[in-house]
């Protein structure tokens, strides 16, 4: 039984057999994973080296009693509260240009959900040659301007979500509404890709 | 020659992607470069008349 009872049998087959990679379990990754599980995805590969901290609770899918725990473990616990029957591959690693490819080799679609511009660029450089669809995000900090968080296809395999300008380094805070919008858009793009729908 | 950059036609004397973006002051280290519908990593690729070049900034936050 899927948590998403709105799927047709054909859609369920596609969704439940897909393996999706999520690079980062912070604001984007934890919320994107939550949306994917609610959509009916059962097989996720999640990579993150970090631990839950108090400053994460303003936007990330964690709870106060999980502070100090590894993000991949805390996220797995939370996702299994939505859907106990999950096949999760958890990598407690800092992603590098060397280990990113092997970590997500089995995935059909990979979600870039890292924080710094340098890490995002590194990951895209490592994963784009794999010729798999990648959903990335750039420009989601601050408040307001929801409709400026757009999405565009770049090249054959990259879908970029965000306004490409709202940078936390310019003093804008990473806060739940805009980060959540981008995370939901990343998840929506994954499911649309899997189902062959317009992104 | 004339290329399309960020959706606008521009006349340029630049011969390569690097040359063009360098003159524009674009920091390519945190950007995705798309040339004629393909993401490129090699900035030494020559531009040609009618090339379509797009730059997408990668900024921090997640």
Image (cartoon, rainbow, N blue to C red):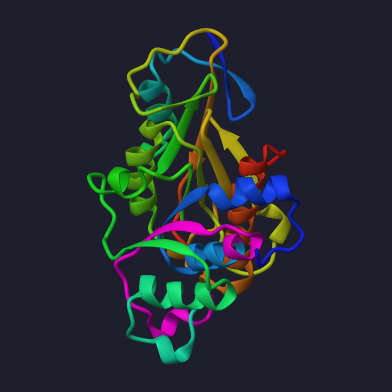
Q: Foreground: A30 or B24?
A: A30
Q: Residue at x 48, y 51 (%)?
A: A20
Say whether residue A128 is visible.
yes
Q: Residue at x 62, y 45 (%)?
A: A14
Above or below, A52 against A154 in this view is: below
Q: Quadrant of residue A151?
A: top right
The location of residue A103, given as percent across then percent down, is 31, 50
Say if the magenta span includes residue A117. no
Above or below, B26 against A88 in this view is: above
Q: Foreground: A82 or A188?
A: A82
Above or below, A176 against A87 in this view is: below
The residue lying furthest to the left in this view is A98
The location of residue B43, given as percent across then percent down, is 35, 24
Q: Is residue A148 left or right of residue A131?
A: right
The location of residue A108, given as percent across then percent down, is 48, 42
Above or below, B35 against A38 in this view is: above
Q: Residue at x 54, y 52 (%)?
A: A165
Q: Residue at x 51, y 52 (%)?
A: A138
Say whether residue A60 is visible.
no
The residue lying furthest to the bottom in this view is A65
The location of residue A106, given as percent across then percent down, is 39, 44
Q: Quadrant of the N terminus of chain A?
A: bottom right
The span picked out in magenta is: A36-61
Total count of labels: 0
Q: Quadrant of the C terminus of chain A?
A: top right
């Amino acid at each position: 039984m899927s948590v998403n009872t709105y799927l047709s049998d054909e859609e369920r087959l596609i969704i439940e057999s897909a393996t999706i990679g999520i690079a980062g379990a912070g604001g984007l990754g934890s919320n994107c994973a939550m949306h994917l599980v609610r959509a009916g995805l059962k097989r996720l590969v999640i990579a993150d080296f970090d631990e839950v901290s108090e400053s994460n609770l303003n936007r990330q899918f964690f709870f106060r009693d999980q502070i100090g725990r590894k993000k991949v473990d805390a996220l797995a616990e939370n996702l299994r509260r939505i859907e106990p029957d999950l096949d999760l591959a958890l990598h407690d690693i800092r992603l590098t240009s060397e280990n990113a490819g092997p970590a997500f080799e089995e995935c059909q679609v990979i979600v870039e959900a890292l924080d710094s511009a340098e890490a995002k660029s590194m990951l895209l450089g490592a994963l784009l040659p794999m010729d798999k669809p990648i959903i990335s995000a750039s420009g989601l900090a601050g408040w307001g301007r929801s409709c400026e968080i757009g999405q565009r296809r770049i090249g054959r395999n990259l879908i970029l979500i965000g306004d490409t300008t709202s940078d936390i380094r310019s003093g804008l805070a990473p806060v739940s509404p805009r980060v959540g919008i981008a995370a939901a858009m990343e998840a929506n793009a994954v499911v649309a890709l899997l189902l062959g729908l317009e992104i | 020659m004339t290329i399309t950059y960020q959706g606008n036609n521009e006349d340029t004397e630049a011969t390569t992607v690097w040359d063009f973006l360098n003159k524009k002051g674009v920091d390519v280290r945190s950007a995705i470069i798309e040339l004629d519908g393909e993401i490129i990593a090699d900035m030494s690729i020559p531009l040609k008349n009618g090339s379509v070049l797009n730059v997408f900034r990668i900024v921090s936050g997640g």
